[in-house]
Image (tube, coloured by chain):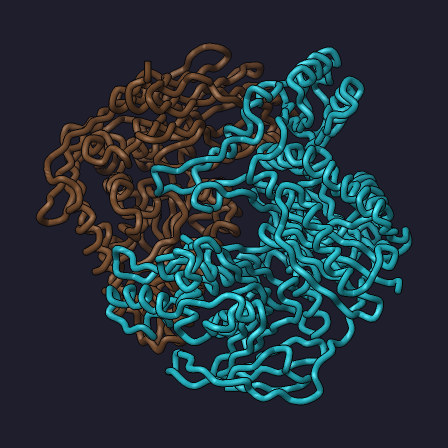
């Protein structure tokens, strides 16, 4: 039975697998992530799914796609072996000085993360590239050879090189790499001009160091993965999910592990864009709520938004600014500390607050009965009747309703609200937080969030999505199938893709098209060869072009997408118009008399679209409710019909209020909404009143 | 109002001002706004009381904006306002203490009457006059003085005022771009609040504002009552360009019964002939900032939470400047205002105070002609010294306190003006020793690639008097400012020879507690 495709997503807690045959039938499974040896869990999950399907490795002659948290884990746990940093002499403390910004003005106890590379392993190199790209001082080979000797004696296995203005002129960095590799052939070398060739030395150094730090872990891991797949008889090389929402060969991924950081969440966002395409919805917001955090991502024109900068490993109370900045194209997501385990409390002003403190999964909410003693969002959901105490995880885990009532009731005493009001308050306050974060995220990008359809997943997402959608003035909520292994599924609907960026400051009134040709040709060639390595036919690679642009005098850029290759028309008026349209969308402003400059060029190479999805196997007969239970809404408490999701027939309509249960989550349909099951197995709730 | 409904409405107000601030920061031209976040955004009730502020910006701006709205509405006849009006002011005594900071205030008309105001203050790139620096002899030399007036009248630009501004600033495009940013971001705030009222069936926000302000004030008083009552004394000395020594003395009275803190700066230095004098708004802003950082961190920042903190200083002293004292570089002194207060409180809240920090950021601006003879003026850029240590944590290096503005990256500056940096690294060991070490300062060197002399407007500080340690911790190193290898102490613009390298060694922060043997 050839024609199978395999997807494995290794997350912090679970390793998920999806195996799909050529007819679109899927087998899914989940095992606990094996942190000591991730591949153990990988193949345990694969064996389970293959066993269910009765498939052999030889049958998997379609893709094997992998999303993994290995890079993030290496960072958070500081698991990388000692790494060194080579910088321009006189600028050795770039990681300590950062951008000098105190990210929280009002907290006297603020902390900054310790750099991944300490001062003792930072080496100044006498070299200098000027801002125009000219080389004022070249490399002294002897000095670099001396550094190589020190690296060797200190048993350093990975090095980051970040010289001033190298985004403009990489020759000095490349020379250093050549010398180092001649002396130490097994050394991992990350050049800032390869990893993140953009202006701003701290951001570039931070990104390059993250890459260097994680390379000695990621590359052997990917090599072992390839070898094990091969030795087990899988015919194809694995493809790796990147943060930008594309998949690429293991070779490129191993050289640039910094591009894999958001691998799993990116796959989740791709599912949202997959369904946007299937359902014919151009723009929507994906909403993923788990135990400790909620994530939202905007899909625009059926594509997830991609951002150029994000932050990893926020260490001081999860505050923005307390982590390591990384300037790598990544699915543009917002994550806030609001999940099922978020703790509700009354603050010193008598206000109800929810999160960011979380009971997590251990001890978890009070109703888990594992020692949690503070009221959480899940406890409130249980009291409101949204969750069934005897049917959580298919009944595998009994929930302690009385325990939940006791702590939520206590919370209500200080607010002078009754049990239902208090529980509903928790539900509303956490909903407001998520809506506020989603609104801010959208408006930052010049997008009006009001009315955007919401696509919900994650353990707690389907419980809360309908209310968040109401707050966002949306009238559609989509609950996709396979929600429990959604990221793994996402990797299977993803085309190969690589995003590359090159800094090259060019004033538009002084543009030199030959220079632009050179830059874009070079990026195109690099991206094409990466996609060919990932098994894509040379001629099937499609390119799109973009740039980071700004008015001269501004310090931040706006990323714009060009409709076509700008070199074809060489029409600067058109380029300016595209920039001004984008600027206008973000800021409602056009500045006719200001000059415009391009700071970086962006090229996206994409393989052919993947479409192996077929209609779901849905029951033919309309299901009746399996029972009723009391649930509390803003409009009051009512008896609400409860359905099992797998029983629902195609086109079956379920008017709200209603509760639809799955093994891993529960869907709440609010009063005034009606849910319909479509042929793909999505449940789509629409506002009817 | 119960704690659930209030939380929902209040959090919506905060999300509205945050959205306004985000829009403003991303749209602004002024690099200190965009890269350094030197801005303040707030929402005010119909009486001009600050109800919500965005969690961004600098304390000097935020709390000055709170005062500005009240001052504006106390002076401006609000019955003359119509929908579409936008008020503007940069009077140092009405708003944020120097002409560069322009405050915009926009009324929100809802159902025919004003229910709120949206305001912002940002540091503009230029305001004419002297430019960046402390060299002007009186306030009039420092730039264009805009009294409270309408920038827009019923949605139409006030052409006379626009013309005056256009003719009086060196970078009119950037200034008008930034003003447009302030106006359009206020419109976003106003639209969102109108939407909130629609959705919740509110005719105005008077009751909501009252509830927010009252609860904030009560909670602040309660938090003050947790401190031991009494009178505490603190002091801070530092030197400024030109060598003068400034002495700030604070008498902090914690009135346990009233739940109030009174800060009196009697005994502090008199006015300076240089443009480093601080108006009361700004002194008040940094004083309340210092007190609040020692109180319950749950407390919001609004009219109610600021009310129990009272600040006074002798008229005409350096931190209660009077007309016509020059005030342009007021941050040089203003940023030290928290230090004597923390010094006074170190025995009663040792876990939340910070040993003396390097103080004001060192600001730079460069003017000159490039090799082709084209003249250029850089934007203002700045560098931090070390922050003081805390009882339980060391002081961060190259991090400024009480503000925390980001530095413009070396590569961004090198790409925008003909400057070349020779070094930028920590000055190891410059932080004071102690049980917890003070943060290190940094050493920065740069030269110009123009082949001709150029003008440097630099404002270093703490060249002679170091940041003290607390509780037996040692002082940080003093700063050094060298041009062509020679120390310079000068409050005015200086001409630098073509080949000279400028070296900045920013001061280290003080240590905390005795160094373990």
The image shows residue A570, relative to residue A184, as above or below, that is: below
Q: Position of residue B379 (x, y in %)?
A: 50, 35
For the C terminus of chain B, which image quadrant?
A: top left
Q: Position of residue A14 (x, y in %)?
A: 61, 54
Q: Residue at x 45, y 82 (%)?
A: A629
Q: Position of residue B259 (x, y in %)?
A: 14, 48
The image shows residue A358, relative to residue A669, as above or below, that is: above
Q: Is residue B181 visible?
A: no
The front one of A543 and A461 is A461
The front one of A287 and A75 is A75
Chain identifier matching the cyan colour in the rendered picture: A
The residue sitting at the left extreme is B257
Q: Residue at x 58, y 76 (%)?
A: A476
Q: Is residue A185 shown left or right of residue A548?
A: right
Q: Is residue B140 shown left or right of residue A463?
A: left
Q: Is residue A335 shown left or right of residue A167?
A: left
Q: Position of residue B133 (x, y in %)?
A: 39, 30
The front one of B262 and A401 is A401
Q: Residue at x 17, y 45 (%)?
A: B226
Chain B as rendered: colour: brown
Quadrant of residue A580 within the rendered picture: bottom right
For the N terminus of chain B, which image quadrant?
A: bottom left
The image shows residue B150, relative to residue A167, as above or below, that is: below
């Amino acid at each position: 039975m050839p024609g199978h495709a395999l997807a494995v997503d290794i997350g912090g807690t679970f390793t998920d697998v999806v195996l799909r045959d050529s007819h679109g039938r899927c087998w899914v499974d989940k095992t606990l992530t094996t942190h000591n040896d991730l591949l153990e869990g990988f193949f345990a999950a694969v064996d389970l799914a293959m066993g269910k399907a009765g498939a052999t490795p030889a049958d998997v002659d379609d893709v094997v796609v992998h999303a993994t948290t290995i890079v993030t884990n290496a960072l958070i746990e500081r698991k990388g072996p000692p790494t060194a940093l080579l910088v321009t002499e006189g600028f050795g403390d770039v990681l300590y000085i950062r951008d000098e910004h105190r990210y929280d003005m009002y907290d006297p106890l603020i902390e900054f993360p310790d750099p991944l590379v300490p001062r003792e392993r930072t080496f100044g190199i006498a070299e200098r590239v000027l801002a125009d790209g000219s080389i004022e001082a070249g490399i002294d080979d002897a000095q670099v050879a001396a550094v190589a000797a020190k690296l060797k004696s200190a048993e350093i296995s990975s090095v980051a090189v970040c010289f001033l203005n190298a985004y403009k002129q990489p020759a000095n960095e490349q020379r250093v790499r050549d010398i180092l590799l001649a002396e130490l052939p097994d050394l991992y070398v990350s050049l800032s001009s390869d990893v993140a060739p953009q202006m701003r030395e701290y951001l570039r150094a931070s990104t390059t160091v993250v890459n260097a730090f994680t390379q000695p872990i990621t590359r052997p891991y990917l090599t072992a993965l390839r070898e094990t797949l091969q030795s087990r008889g899988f015919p194809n090389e694995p493809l790796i999910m990147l943060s930008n929402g594309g998949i690429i060969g293991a070779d490129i991924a191993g050289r640039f592990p910094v591009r894999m950081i958001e691998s799993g969440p990116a796959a989740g966002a791709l599912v949202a864009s997959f369904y946007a395409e299937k359902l014919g919805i151009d723009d929507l917001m994906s909403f993923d709520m788990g135990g400790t955090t909620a994530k939202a991502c905007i899909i625009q024109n059926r594509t997830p938004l991609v951002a150029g900068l994000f932050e990893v490993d926020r260490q001081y109370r999860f505050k923005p600014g307390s982590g390591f900045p990384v300037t790598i194209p990544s699915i543009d997501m917002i994550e806030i500390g609001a999940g099922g385990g978020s703790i509700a409390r009354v603050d010193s002003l008598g206000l109800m607050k929810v999160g960011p403190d979380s009971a997590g999964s251990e001890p978890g909410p009070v109703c888990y009965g594992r020692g949690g003693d503070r009221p959480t969002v899940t406890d409130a959901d249980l009291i409101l009747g949204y969750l069934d105490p005897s049917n959580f995880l298919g009944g595998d885990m009994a929930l302690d309703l009385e325990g939940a009532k006791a702590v939520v009731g206590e919370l209500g005493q200080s607010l002078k609200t009754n049990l239902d009001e208090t529980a509903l308050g928790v539900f509303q306050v956490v909903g407001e937080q998520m809506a506020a974060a989603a609104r801010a995220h959208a408006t930052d990008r010049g997008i009006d969030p009001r009315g955007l359809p919401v696509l919900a997943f994650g353990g707690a997402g389907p419980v809360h999505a309908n209310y968040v959608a109401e707050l966002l003035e949306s009238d559609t909520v989509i609950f996709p199938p396979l929600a429990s292994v959604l990221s793994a599924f996402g990797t299977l609907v993803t085309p190969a893709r690589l995003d590359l960026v090159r800094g090259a400051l060019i004033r538009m009134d002084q543009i030199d098209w030959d220079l632009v040709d050179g830059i874009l040709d070079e990026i195109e060639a690099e991206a094409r060869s990466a996609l060919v390595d990932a098994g894509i036919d040379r001629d099937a690679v499609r390119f799109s072009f973009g740039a980071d642009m700004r008015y001269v005098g501004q310090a931040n850029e706006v990323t714009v997408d060009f409709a076509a290759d700008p070199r074809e028309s060489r029409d600067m008026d058109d380029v300016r118009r595209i920039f001004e349209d984008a600027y206008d969308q973000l800021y409602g402003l056009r500045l006719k008399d200001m000059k415009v400059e391009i700071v970086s060029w962006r090229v996206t190479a994409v393989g052919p679209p993947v479409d192996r999805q077929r209609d779901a196997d849905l029951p033919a007969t309309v299901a009746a409710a399996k029972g009723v239970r009391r649930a509390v809404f803003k409009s009051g408490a009512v008896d609400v019909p409860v359905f099992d999701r797998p029983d629902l027939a195609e086109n079956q309509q379920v008017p709200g209020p209603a509760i639809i249960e799955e093994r891993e989550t529960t869907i709440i349909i609010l009063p005034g909404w009606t849910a319909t099951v479509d042929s793909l197995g999505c449940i789509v709730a629409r506002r009817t009143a | 109002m119960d704690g659930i409904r209030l939380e929902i409405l209040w959090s919506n107000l905060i999300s509205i001002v945050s959205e306004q601030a985000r829009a403003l920061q991303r749209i602004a031209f002024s690099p200190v706004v965009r890269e350094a976040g030197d801005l303040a955004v707030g929402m005010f009730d119909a009486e001009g009381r600050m109800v919500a502020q965005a969690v961004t910006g600098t304390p000097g701006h935020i709390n000055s904006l709170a005062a500005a709205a009240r001052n504006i509405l106390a002076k401006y006849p609000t019955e003359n306002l119509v929908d579409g009006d936008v008020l503007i002011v940069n009077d140092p005594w009405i708003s944020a203490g120097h002409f560069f900071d322009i405050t915009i205030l926009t009324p929100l008309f809802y159902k025919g009457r004003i229910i709120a105001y949206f305001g912002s203050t940002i540091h503009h790139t230029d305001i004419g006059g002297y430019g960046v620096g402390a060299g002007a002899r009186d306030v009039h030399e420092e730039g264009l003085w805009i009294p409270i007036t309408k920038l827009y009248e019923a949605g139409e630009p006030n052409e006379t005022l626009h013309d005056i501004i256009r003719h009086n600033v060196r970078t009119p495009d950037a200034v008008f771009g930034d003003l447009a940013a302030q106006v359009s971001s206020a419109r976003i705030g106003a639209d969102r609040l109108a939407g909130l009222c629609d959705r919740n069936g509110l005719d105005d926000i008077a009751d909501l504002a009252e509830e927010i302000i009252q609860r904030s004030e009560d909670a602040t008083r309660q938090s003050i009552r947790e401190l031991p009552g009494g009178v505490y004394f603190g002091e801070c000395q530092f030197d400024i360009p030109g060598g003068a020594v400034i002495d700030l003395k604070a008498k902090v009275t914690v009135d346990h019964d009233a739940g109030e803190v009174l800060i009196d700066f009697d005994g502090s230095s008199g006015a300076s002939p240089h443009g480093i004098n601080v108006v009361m708004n700004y002194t008040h802003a940094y004083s309340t900032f210092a007190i609040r950082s020692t109180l319950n961190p749950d407390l919001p920042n609004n009219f109610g939470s600021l009310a129990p903190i009272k600040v006074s200083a002798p008229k005409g002293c350096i931190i209660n400047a009077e007309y016509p004292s020059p005030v342009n570089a007021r941050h040089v002194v203003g940023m030290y205002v928290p230090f004597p207060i923390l010094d006074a409180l170190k025995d009663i809240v040792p876990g939340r105070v910070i040993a003396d920090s390097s103080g004001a950021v060192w600001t730079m601006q460069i003017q000159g002609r490039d090799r082709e003879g084209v003249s250029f003026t850089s934007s203002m850029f700045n560098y931090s010294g070390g922050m003081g240590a805390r009882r339980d944590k060391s002081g961060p290096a190259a991090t400024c306190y009480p503000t925390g503005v980001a530095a413009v990256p070396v590569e961004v500056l090198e790409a925008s003006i003909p400057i070349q940096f020779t070094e930028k690294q920590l000055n190891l060991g410059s932080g004071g020793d102690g049980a917890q070490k003070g943060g290190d300062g940094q050493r920065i060197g740069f030269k110009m690639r123009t082949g001709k002399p150029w003008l440097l407007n630099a404002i270093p500080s703490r060249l002679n008097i170091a940041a003290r340690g607390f509780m037996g911790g040692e002082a940080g190193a003093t700063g050094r400012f060298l041009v062509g290898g020679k120390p310079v102490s000068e409050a005015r613009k200086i001409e630098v020879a073509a080949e000279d390298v400028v070296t900045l060694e920013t001061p280290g922060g003080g240590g905390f507690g005795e160094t373990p043997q």
